[in-house]
Image: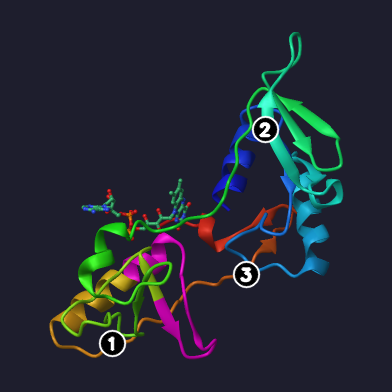
Amino acid sequence: MIGLDLARSLVQAGYRVRLVSGEMTFWPHQVAEEQRGMFCDGLRNMGIEVIKGDGAGGVRAIEVGATGLPARRLVFHDGSDLYGDLVMSFMGLVPATEFMISSGLDIERGVLVSTALQTSNAHIYAAGDVCQIWSPEEHCYRFYYGYHNVKSMGIVAAHNMMGANEQFVSTRGESLRLDQQGHIDSPFWECD
Ligand SMILES: Cc1cc2nc3c(=O)[nH]c(=O)nc-3n(C[C@H](O)[C@H](O)[C@H](O)COP(=O)(O)OP(=O)(O)OC[C@H]3O[C@@H](n4cnc5c(N)ncnc54)[C@H](O)[C@@H]3O)c2cc1C
């Protein structure tokens, strides 16, 4: 959603934006395949040109453009291409956990914590993007994105370090939606 936020800002500033869509276009929202078209139309309503990357077999390479043409060339697996002045790729987030590798904490993609935000070492709690929190509903450790969640994790972890027994519960809606103008809108775009 960070890339889409930037795309809408660039359109508002008068730039032409072409977006190559794919399975992860709306990440971290989980959008079912049958709903993707509707949300891509939402992007078009916002002035973003959407090109189906899957249809062209996905992106194969980003190359230097040719003389007299824009600076960058995007090449798809089916041999088709697109030229643009700038290509930006958005690939999600991975927390930097390397420095904790020898700490003895259980780490997967992030530091694994209980719903009380306690790590596998009972004396260590964690909060923030670095946490993969146990979800009893989904029976897996998962990330909870966005600064509202992160702020709430900080409070829960601090209270629990002081002896409380609070559980982190995401209070944020996680659904992508269309607003009255038919534009996409995300709870990750909300700020205080
Ligand atoms: C470009 C961008 C746009 C975003 N936009 C939104 C948005 O619109 N809405 C929203 O809700 N969320 C947004 N987010 C997500 C939000 O910023 C994060 O959820 C939030 O900042 C996470 O807070 P944090 O304290 O867990 O981690 P961070 O803010 O990443 O802080 C971690 C800190 O730890 C430091 N650090 C890392 N390794 C070490 C080390 N070994 N030693 C010491 N210090 C270390 C880092 O330098 C950093 O300062 C955005 C994120 C990005 C990257």
In the rendered structure, are the residues bearing label 3 and label 1 in contact, judged by CB atoms less than 8 Å apart? Answer: no
Please report the residue visible at 33 percent of the width from the left and 86 percent of the height from the top: 167
**Residue that sits furthest to the left in the current view:** 162
Query: Between disc 2 and disc 3, whose residue precedes?
Result: 2
Please report the residue visible at 78 percent of the width from the left and 61 percent of the height from the top: 36
Q: Is residue 146 magenta?
A: yes
Q: Amino acid at mark 3?
A: Ser
SS class, disc 3: loop
| Image location of residue 83, percent across then percent down | 76, 25
Residue range of the region highlighted in magenta in the rendering? 133-152
Q: Relative to 46, does residue 169 appear above or below in the rendering?
A: below
Q: Nearer the viewer, mark 2 or mark 3?
A: 2
**Residue wearing tag 2:** 62
Q: CA distance from mark 1 to mark 2?
A: 48 Å
| Image location of residue 124, percent across then percent down | 19, 77
SS class, disc 2: strand
| Image location of residue 137, percent across then percent down | 52, 90
From the viewer's side, name the closer residue of 130 and 63. Answer: 63
| Image location of residue 101, percent across then percent down | 28, 65
Q: Is residue 7 magenta?
A: no
Please report the residue visible at 25 percent of the width from the left and 58 percent of the height from the top: 99
Q: Amino acid at mark 1?
A: Glu
Which quarter of the image is occupied by the C terminus? bottom left
Q: Relative to 19, does residue 178 appear above or below in the rendering?
A: below
